[in-house]
Amino acid sequence: MAAPNEKLASSLQILKALQDRGISVFRGSAHPELTRTHRERLLAAGFLKPVIQGWYQSNNPEDDEGDSTHWYANMETFVAAYAHARFGDQWQLSPELSLLKHSGYTSVEKQILLHSPLAANQPQALPHGCSMFLYQTKPELLAQGRAPNASGLLLVPLPEALIRASPSFFHTHELAAQIVTRQVDISSLTARLLEGGHSVVAGRMAGALRAVGRATDAEQLVQTMRAATYVVVEDNPFERPLAHIGGRMNESPYVQRIQAMWSSMREIVIDRFEGIPRLSNLDSEALLHDIEARYVADAYHSLSIEGYRVSTDLIEKVRSGDWSPLINKEDRQARDAMAAKGYAEAHKRVRLLIGEVVAQMNEPAITLRRDFSQWYVTLFSPSVTAGILKASDLAGYRNNNVFIRNALHVPLAPEAVRDCMPALFDLLLAEDHPGVRAVLGHFIFVFIHPYMDGNGRLSRFLMNYLLTTGGYPWTIVTVQSQTAYLAALEQASTYRNIKPFADLICGLIESQAAEPIERITQRPESGSWTAPPPDSDPSHAFA
């Protein structure tokens, strides 16, 4: 008779086969190989979790009961699979949610509205306070040309979604409305307006087009509708002036989103920096000495935020060169030691670059664009040398999706990362306020989350590079501020509220500038971290 561990192993083998086919959320009856016995065994061990009756999702048994990360990562996939199972292809997202998706909005919507002629106007509760509402619609209102997004959700095509969306969408989701109005093809939009005789909507769309800078297209739309004998009164649906978005109208919606966020947030950051003293004449030697003096405290707190258990003794050992993975077995095997070694090497590289920029009075953003990719390589090279990571892991931006633990914000898809990172460097170069560069550079970087791991460490290096070359001191994000720090990043990412993050960073600058350097850099009394151990998932946090 098989032992319990052997039985669990056989069930895990079947679950792995499903996962290898890209199936992470499924209906039990759709996969007869995963019998009731296997499901019960996997549920008891924590490798499966129920979603609703008859539906399951893969789960990490080490996650806390209240951990929402895996659910948020799979929610849209579940909704798409459920809708296909129940309605076939006779369904679509609501026009408003379709527009959000077309606009590059990536945060989790806790209620998803589905339209289908086969629905019965009923809500369906989902885990972690989420839900979907199954709204009955007429068959003729199923849009032609519906296409699935990466999660399998069927979206109403952009012109049709703009026509059907409520006028309130233009002020409740102002940024999304601005982006999709910039994107929509004027010929397709005009054709659909003429087919449906939508004269009122045509006036609204003409006003929206003019508001986003498409005055010629607005005129063309109105003249075409009037030529077809429709009475059109132009009406701007936006309630206030819009954030500036540069570049092409049909540029990536993700790029447009970060450009608009930068434009709308910068004045808030500038106001918060008011009164914080800035050195106009930087002494590179004194600056480097100050940065070096803060190193141990900086490494302690930055690694602690990520959950590494690394003592200050290890940090000193690494910095002095006593760390030896070729001789010392503990050094070779310790993941935490690799993190400390990589941090030391990356800190040194950033510090030397700061000295070069200040001494030669170079433009910080130009030098950053040239050197930044090597910061990531330097940070993780020790882990490659020790065999913890593959050499290919140093290749560059990620090729897979990542999710932030318990956060509604979902980082951009890999293809969007490749559009947005050059746009971030362009924004840094165009910005003239060093405080805005530092705060928004940090925020936008973690919003994009370009790497599978190390995004938090790199974002804090980025922030301090831009602070110090702009006349502000190197500033340590302390482990004591971790909860507020992560919450502020979530506020900025999901709700476009940058004020908590600007307040936190500026507050740290002010408090640390007021303290003697000895107080900032003193060794922690415990000598080691007290943060929880790191996740097995490298994308576990903004850190």
Image: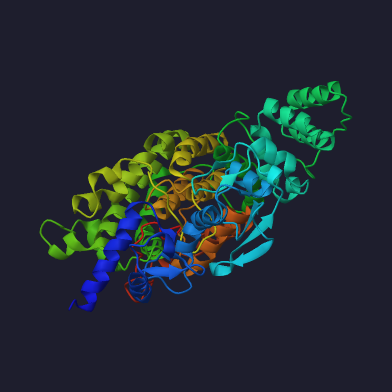
Q: How is the image coloured?
A: rainbow
Q: Which of 162 and 404 is in front in this view?
A: 162
**How far across and down, in percent of the image, does residue 125 sit?**
59, 68
- Image side of residue 233 versus residue 323, left or right: right
**How far across and down, in percent of the image, does residue 321 sit?**
20, 56
Q: Residue at x 44, y 65 (%)?
A: 56
**How far across and down, in percent of the image, does residue 137 sit?**
70, 51
Q: Which residue is drawn at 88% across and 24% down?
A: 229
Q: Is residue 198 visible from the viewing direction of this image?
A: yes
Q: Is residue 235 visible from the viewing direction of this image?
A: no
The mark total stands at: 0
Location of residue 301 with respect to 23 vertically, above or below: below
Location of the C terminus (image quadrant): bottom left
**How far across and down, in percent of the image, does residue 181 sit?**
69, 36
Instruction: Give the quadrant of residue 70.
Output: bottom left
Q: Residue at x 39, y 58 (%)?
A: 294
Location of residue 533 with respect to 456 vertically, above or below: below
Location of the N terminus (image quadrant): bottom left
- Image side of residue 351 versus residue 444, left or right: left
Q: Which of 233 and 527 is in front in this view?
A: 233
Instruction: Give the quadrant of residue 399.
Output: top left
Location of residue 523 with respect to 426 vertically, above or below: below
Q: Residue at x 88, y 33 (%)?
A: 233
Q: Which of 335 and 253 is in front in this view?
A: 253
- Image side of residue 215 versus residue 514, left or right: right
